[in-house]
Each structure stands twice: as C-alpha cells, then as structure tokens.
Image (cartoon, rainbow, N blue to C red):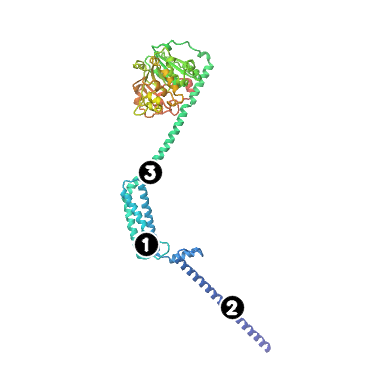
Amino acid sequence: MAVAFRGGRSGGVIGGGSGASAGLRGLFSCRIIVSALFSLLFLAALSVVLNSSRRHRDPTLPNKGSAYMHRTFLALQSDPLKTRLDLIYKQATDHLTLVNAYAAYARKLKLDASKQLKLFEDLGINFSDLQYKPDYKSVLSENGNAVEEDTLRQLEKEVKDKVKTVRMMIVESKESYDTQLKIQKLKDTIFAVHEQLTKAKKSGAVASLIAAKSVPKSIHCLAMRLVEERISHPEKYKEAPPDPAMEDPSLYHYAIFSDNVIAVSVVVRSVVMNAEEPWKHVFHVVTDRMNLAAMKVWFKMRPLGRGAHIEIKVVEDFKFLNSSYVPVLRQLESAKFYLPEMYPKLHKILFLDDDVVVQKDLTGLWKINLDGKVNGAVETCFGSFHRYSQYLNFSHPLIKESFNPNACAWAFGMNIFDLDAWRREKCTEQLHHWQNLNEEQNLWRLGTLPPGLITFYSKTKSLDKTWHVLGLGYNPGVSMDEIRNAAVIHYNGNMKPWLDIAMNQYKSLWTKYVDNEMEFVQMCNFGL
C-alpha cells in the first residue's frame, strides 16, 4: 500500500512539473508574438509619417497609398500663410477679370469716356504686373517656396488698394456702362426683330399674292350656280335686241373689264344708287368666255333698275383684237387700250376697275375740260415716290431720251378718256410702237401701268384727288375723311374686299353695295 502510494505521488509530481514547463513556453511565445506585432505597427506608423512629411515637402505628390490618409496629413501640416496667399491671389484675379470685362465692353460700345477706358486698361496691367515683381514672383510661383509673413502682408496691402480703386471706378461708371449695355442689347433685339419682320413681310406678301390670284370658293360657287341656272332655264335667258342707248354719245358711258361677277355687280350698283339721273348711265361690261353666261344671268335675275342700261360682251366679240393687230395680247388686261376701236361712235367714256366703289354722282367728270388731252386721271406721286423712274428703265437710251424720270405717275382705276383726242393723237399706234420695242422686256416691267404711262405721256390731265382715293387694298393708313370726301374709292392692292384678307376697317364700304337679296349670294355663304 505504501509503495503504491509513493508511486502514485511520484507519478503526480512528475506529471505536474511537465505541465508547468509547457505553460512557461506558451507564455514566452505569446510575449514574442505581441512584441513583434507592436514592432510592426510602430514601423508602419513611422513609415506613414515619414512618407507624409516627404510629400509635404514635395509639391508633386505621388499617387500611392490611401488618398484619404494623404489629405488628412496634408491638412494637419498645411501652412496657414499659404492658404491666406491663395485667397489674396484669387481676389486679385477675380477683380482683374472684372476690369478686363469692363474694358472690353467699353471698346465694343465705343464709349466717349476714353479716359475711363484707359484707367481700366492701366489697372488691368497693374494687376498682371504684381506676379512679376521680384518680391512676389517666388511667393506666387508653384515651386512651393516658404511664404514670409512680411511679404504676404505687403502683397495683401497692394492688392486691397487696387481692389478698392477698381470698386470705386466701377461704382462711378456703372450707370454709364449699364446704360450703354442696355442700348446695345436693345439694338441687338431690334435687329433680330427687324430680321423676323422682314421674313414675315416676305412670307405675308407671297401668301397675300396667292390669295389675291386665287378664286375664293364663294365666288366659284356663285358662278357655278348662275351657269346652272342658265342651263336649267334657257328660255329665260334669250338674247335681247340691241339697245340703241349703247351707241348714244349723249349718255354717260362706262367701260368695265372683269371676270368677277360679284365685283362687277357692286361697281354697277354703286354707280346707279348714287347717280342723280341713272337712266342716262350706260355700262359696257366685257368679260371672258368662261364667265359670260354667269354675268348675263346675274344681271337678268337682278336688273339694274332706275332705267340704267347695261350690255355684256366677251372679248372675242371684238374681232379686231387678234394677234395680227395686237402685239401683246392679254385679253381682258389689255382691252382698255382699245376703247376707241371698241366703241367707235362714242366721244367720251369712263373706265372703272372692278375693285372700286362709287360713292357720289360721277356726271361731273364728263363736264371737265381736258384741254385737248386724252386721259383724265388722279396723279399718285408724292415726293420721290410714284415717278416715271419707278416704272420705266431709264438706263435704256430710248427711255432716257423720250421721257422725264421725274414726271408724275397716275393710276388706272378711274379714268375719263376723250376718245376723239385718242384717235387724233393716234395713241394706239404709239402703244404698238413701244410694245414692239419692248419685245425683250428691257424697257419696262410687266403690267399695264407702264405702257399706259408711255402711251399717255404728256396727254394726261390731272384731276382733283377727291375724285379717286386709292390704297384701300394695301394701305391701312387711308383716313376716313379722305374716304368720305371721295367720289370713287379704290381697293387696289392684294387685300380685295371680297377676300378673307381684306382690311376690316374698309370692307363695309364695299359690302353695303352687295345685293344680299340675291338668292345665290345667300346660298354661297359669302360671309359678308
């Protein structure tokens, strides 16, 4: 038992010593590992600190390590004088930019204050010269040189003085500069608007011309219904025997050339309604073959009344109007140049366009002494406008030798013609002569007014302007006083009163003579 006890104790002692030895070894190993870790951490921290110091000294930082760490260490070690220098430099550059801007605007606007301009330019040069001064050049350079406080204070003082001067100058001249800038801006705006207006005018002129030359649906409808009426009831529209009044020179004769039924009806109706003796008035209407039936049906359905006379013919009824006799054959357009041949038994005739309205009795026109001249018309010239030079090519020697460029033009639309004087002066032969010379169209532009001005040059008697007021088809400035005093008002221009583009202030002067009781006018929705 005793042996066993000892053996057991001995075994226990031996086992306990071995465990203590192992514990010491483990503790020693842990201390070594911990020491090693602390050493590594110390070395790492030291490396970062040294690396940061080197980067602070070197202005070009290498792109290594953590960017966040770099910014942190740079912020901790930044020079406050350097930051202050940067702020001063930024203030100087900002005011230099402002000075240059004012100087540039002054040059652009050509201001009278040249002294101010020179001061701004000098200030700009002074600001620029600061960085080239020896005392500041090294400080403002990007080489990272140390900033001395005395130098910085001196630089700051100079910059503040110059900034103060700049601000004072800007305050003194701001009103002048702002006004000039506003003026320039307004000029630019006016120029841009003027360009837009020019384009709009051109577009409007084209659209207006298209509208003027096209046939409105209502007028087309009226012509079709009149023709339909003629076809449906031929017995109602047989040719009437010739009216002897058509060749009676003692009556008042009118010539109207048109293919527009509603327009002719307004002209004739306005004459008759304002005539003191309507039974003495005779109307010679000439149209084209396409509108002949419609024109005849209208005046058959709506007779003139009050004893007035009317005849309706087509151009082709005048057999002499052919290509062998007429050099330039334009049918209705040119027919007015052949009135003596068309009406050989008449002495005087009043020509009316289809876009006029008569407001007074016109018999006084036949009583005017034309002093042996052919044409009685209202002159349209004022100042340098509407002179012969605007209608004829005075660079051509024939025109230059034959006509006065300052001669006053007149208007077709209401013309009293002395047919006897026309025949005596052989005006038609003169017209043909000039038309043959103008075969290449180098004497005048297209239209009937230039050949009219040539044909009746020095053969036109100027009438009082109250007989014929023009411009209601293009000029919104015609006064109502002029219109009220006028015997004839003329819608010359593209804005005809039967079109949607007519000027509203003048349209009612025409619509009041439209025969609204005519059933086809109501059916065709003229919208008058």
Specify the amino acid type for callout 3: Lys
Q: Amino acid at mark 2?
A: Gly
Q: Residues within 10 Å of mark 3 (few under 14, many from 20)?
A: few
**Label of residue 185 in the image:** 3
Which mark's residue is nearer the viewer, 2 or 1?
1
Residue 482 appearing in the image: yes
Residue 523 in the image: above or below residue 9: above
N-terminal of the two: label 2 or label 1? 2
Label 1: few (<14), some or many (≥20) within 10 Å?
A: some
Q: Nearer the viewer, residue 156 or 409?
A: 409
Q: Earlier in the sequence, mark 2 or mark 3?
A: 2
- The image quadrant of residue 151 is bottom left
Give the residue at x 54% y 75%.
Answer: 36
**Which label sits in the foreground, 2 or 3?**
3
Where is mark 2, residue-wise?
26
SS assignment at label 3: helix
The kind of residue on which mark 1 rests is: Tyr
Q: CA distance from mark 2 to mark 1?
A: 67 Å
Q: At which x and y percent is residue 216?
A: 48, 26
Q: Is residue 179 above or below residue 453?
A: below
The dot on residue 136 is 1
Up-down relation of residue 172 to residue 23 (above or below):
above
- Could you say which disc has been placed on residue 320 in the image? none
For mark 1, give the secondary structure: helix
Q: Quadrant of the C terminus?
A: top left
- Which element is circle 2 on? helix
